[in-house]
Amino acid sequence: MNIDNTQSQMRKGILEFCILSVIKRGEAYPSDIIEEMRAAGLQILEGTLYPLLTRLKNAAMLTYRWEESNSGPPRKYFSLTEKGEEFYKELEQTWNELSNAVNTLRTKTR
């Protein structure tokens, strides 16, 4: 069995929740999301993040606004929509249930 594949699948499963967790705290620029994720120990590439942001925007979970930049092209800042807030709450509940169940199973003694 390949541990790398299993680890990758576990990370993919929580990536969306982690990205939404960052955006939930306030508007976020994609490079800031990447920086926060990396600081937390989760590696994410732009090639992974941008398609996810687009998919979430197309599903009406996110909205964005453009802001002019002094050092280059305009920046796109993402924020949660009302639908995105509700989706986040559901993901958070699921995460809490799964996390509690896994921790119970991991720490249970015979």
Image (spheres, rainbow, N blue to C red):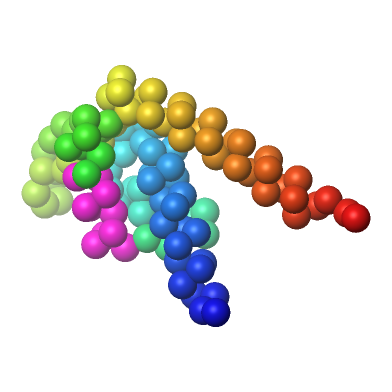
14 lies above or below 10: above
**Residue extending furthest toward the right:** 110
State the predominant SS element of the stretch in magenta: helix
Q: Quadrant of residue 93?
A: top right
What residue lies at 51% left-to-right and 67% top-to-bottom?
Answer: 7
In the image, is residue 103 above or below residue 87? Answer: below
Give the answer, above or below, for where 42 lies relative to 96.
below
Q: Is residue 77 visible?
A: no
Q: Nearer the viewer, residue 41 or 110?
A: 110
Residue 46 on the magenta segment: yes
Q: Residue at x 30, y 23 (%)?
A: 83
In the rendered image, residue 49, in percent from the top left (x then y), is placed at 28, 54
* Residue segment shown in magenta: 45-54
Looking at the figure, which quarter contains the C terminus? bottom right
Left or right side of 33 for 92: right
Give the percent coordinates (x, y) of residue 89. 46, 27
Indicate whether residue 72 is drawn in magenta.
no
Q: Can I make out residue 103 in this image?
A: yes
Quadrant where the N terminus sits is bottom right
Q: Position of residue 2 (x, y in %)?
A: 51, 79
Rendering coords of residue 55 (x, y %): 22, 44
* Depth check, front residue: 30 or 12: 12
Task: Give the residue at x 28% y 59%.
Answer: 48
Q: Which of 39/94 is in front?
A: 94
